[in-house]
Image (cartoon, helix red, strand yellow):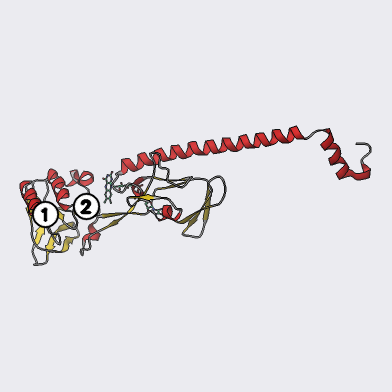
Amino acid sequence: RADEIVRADGPDPLFTVRLDGGATLRTRRVLVATGVRDGLPDLPGLRERWGKDVLHCPYCHGYEVRDRPLGVLATGPMAVHQALLVRQWSPDVAMFPHDQEFSPGDRERLVAGGITLVEGPAKRIAADERGIRGVELADGRVVERAALFVQSDLVPLDGLLTGLGCARENGLVRTDAMGRTSVPGVSAAGNVVQPFGQVIMAAAQGSAAAMALNADLVEEDVRRAVDRERTTARNAAEFGAAVEALVAATVLGDRGHGL
Ligand SMILES: Cc1cc2nc3c(=O)[nH]c(=O)nc-3n(C[C@H](O)[C@H](O)[C@H](O)COP(=O)(O)OP(=O)(O)OC[C@H]3O[C@@H](n4cnc5c(N)ncnc54)[C@H](O)[C@@H]3O)c2cc1C
């Protein structure tokens, strides 16, 4: 696990990566793909079911729970939109407004969309060894559900990038189409710079970034090779008879034997 990345001073990028065990790595380029932390609603029992039958993404999980009794727990402004997406997967969707206030217009949209509103704050997720049973409300009712959708906060784990001084834009580290950040030699890919992206997008960004880094390293190697060639040629051009006589006199003194 990388704790810190430090850029060395110098014309070409060079980095030291400090790992949590104390080891360090030296590298000429860095590609950060540290993803996000999922901030979950603070409801007893919810965290334990996360990724199993407490879900967030209808595109990822909708098919797996299709046609079953589904719930949407509202904890943020995207809840109504999320419920309408979830509704595509099941005729039985219950919306728990919980601690959110819906406008009359949103209520109308939910009802027109065939979604049942279940009023009252949620108290905890009811579950047993087989999985979620439903949502227990503060008044003691348990509304049985096979899966519950929630809005998770996607918090980019971009400390390594910001520690290197990478510029941010709209709350995210800025990258170009090839994953390059504002710091030469530092690239980023995946959820750390695009929190709402899916696996296929993260993989594509990683691939693009890797190609750009490889091309960059090839160019750097060739530039260094050209510099070496030029230095060698310049030295060869400058090393003639006069220089050789001077070297011989300096090294051998009066033992020069006429050299
Ligand atoms: C419950 C759930 C279900 C999902 N289902 C789907 C799905 O069905 N289909 C789909 O396309 N997408 C799905 N997604 C989204 C998908 O997981 C992400 O889009 C994808 O994993 C992003 O890939 P990534 O490489 O950017 O980040 P991640 O896959 O999150 O990988 C980041 C890695 O970096 C590591 N890391 C973090 N900090 C450090 C550090 N300092 N040093 C070293 N390593 C570090 C992390 O431990 C992690 O292993 C789901 C997400 C969740 C939460």
Q: CA distance from mark 2 to mark 1?
A: 14 Å
The amino acid at mark 1 is Met
For label 2, count other residues whose C-alpha is less than 10 Å away and answer few (under 14), some (14-19) or many (20+): many
Q: Which mark is residue 154?
A: none
Numbered disc 1: secondary structure: strand
Would you say the beta carbon of the disc 2 residue lies within 8 angstroms of ligand 1? yes
Q: Is residue 135 visible?
A: yes
From the viewer's side, name the closer residue of 45 and 169.
169
Question: Where's residue 112, x and y in %?
Answer: 5, 47
Q: Is residue 1 visible?
A: no
Q: Which mark is residue 95?
A: 1
Question: Where's residue 20, x and y in %?
Answer: 46, 59
Whether residue 185 sits left or right of residue 152 in the image: it is right
From the viewer's side, name the closer residue of 190 and 238.
238
Contact between marks 2 and 1 (CB within 8 A): the answer is no
Q: Which residue is mark 2?
A: 55
Whether residue 238 sits left or right of residue 83 in the image: it is right
